[in-house]
């Protein structure tokens, strides 16, 4: 009989649990919530497009969301899809993929009203610890204009590839200890 090893799932740190934050699996029933979370990441960008009605913006965001969702599910088979909740209300999402040498953040989103309060920093530090405990780096693709880019750099992430729109970043195992201290 073959034993299949399943690594333990990432858990939020106690500091966030004490504030009412939890993680739970995202289901198909959560599609409207997932769309709302995705849309929150495009608000600033869409605000700069003159002449689009609210309906046009919603149609565009819905199409982009569906394309992203289809891509993730077809090309990242080992991705773990989780919602971040605060007091039982979805306020973010965290999609993780464990690779051979890296834990990869496929996507991390917090609603605008949750940003800047320290939750994202605590989640990232816990993810660094999670990856480091496995002897792996923590990777992510970050849009070059993402305001959180300075946070990733402060936590020890380094650029490993410079694409047209995204920077591929990694917080290597040797950088993890300094970042979480």
Image (cartoon, rainbow, N blue to C red):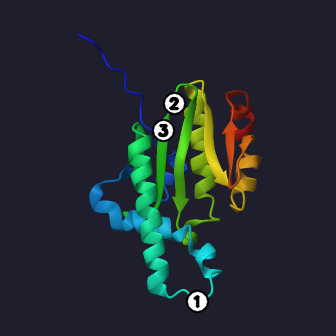
Residue 128 in percent (x, y) is at 61, 38
Q: Residue at x 58, y 31 (%)?
A: 102
The answer to whether the residue labelled 2 contacts the one labelled 3, judged by CB atoms less than 8 Å apart, is yes
Determine the residue located farthest toward the top in the rendered image. Answer: 1
Label 2: few (<14), some (14–19) or many (≥20) C-alpha neighbours in 10 Å: some
In the image, which disc is placed on residue 124? none
**Precedes in sequence: disc 2 or disc 1:** 1
> Which mark, by number, is residue 99?
2
Q: Which residue is mark 3?
A: 97
Name the element at disc 3. Answer: strand
Q: Who is closer to the viewer here, 160 or 102?
A: 160
| Residue in view at x 49 percent, y 70 percent | 39
Question: Tag 1, which secondary structure?
Answer: loop
Q: Position of residue 26 (x, y in %)?
A: 35, 53
Question: Can you give x and y, in whole percent of width and height, for residue 97 in the image?
Answer: 48, 38
Q: Which residue position is annotated with label 1?
A: 51
**Residue 89 vertical placement versus 165 (above, below):** below
- Residue plotted at (61% across, 37% down): 138
Can you tell which of label 2 and label 1 is closer to the viewer? Answer: 1
Instruction: Please report whichever mark, 1 or 3, sits nearer to the chain's N-terminal start.
Output: 1
Q: In the structure shown, which secondary structural element does the residue marked by tag 2 occupy? A: loop
Q: CA distance from mark 2 to mark 1?
A: 43 Å
């Amino acid at each position: 009989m073959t034993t299949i090893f399943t690594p333990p799932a990432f858990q939020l740190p106690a500091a966030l649990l004490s504030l009412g934050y939890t993680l739970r699996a995202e289901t198909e029933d959560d599609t409207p919530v997932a769309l709302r979370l995705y849309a929150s990441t495009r608000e600033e960008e869409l605000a700069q497009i003159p002449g689009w009605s609210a309906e046009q913006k919603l149609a565009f965001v819905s199409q982009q969301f569906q394309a992203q969702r289809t891509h993730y599910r077809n090309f990242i088979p080992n991705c773990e899809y989780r919602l971040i909740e605060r007091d039982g209300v979805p306020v973010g999402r965290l999609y993780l993929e464990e690779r051979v040498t890296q834990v990869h953040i496929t996507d991390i989103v917090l609603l605008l009203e949750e940003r800047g309060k320290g939750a994202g920093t605590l989640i990232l530090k816990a993810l660094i610890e999670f990856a480091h405990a496995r002897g792996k780096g923590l990777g992510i693709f970050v849009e070059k204009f993402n305001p959180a880019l300075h946070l990733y750099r402060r936590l020890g992430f380094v650029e490993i590839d410079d694409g047209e729109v995204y920077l591929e970043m990694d917080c290597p195992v040797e950088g993890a200890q300094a970042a979480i201290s």
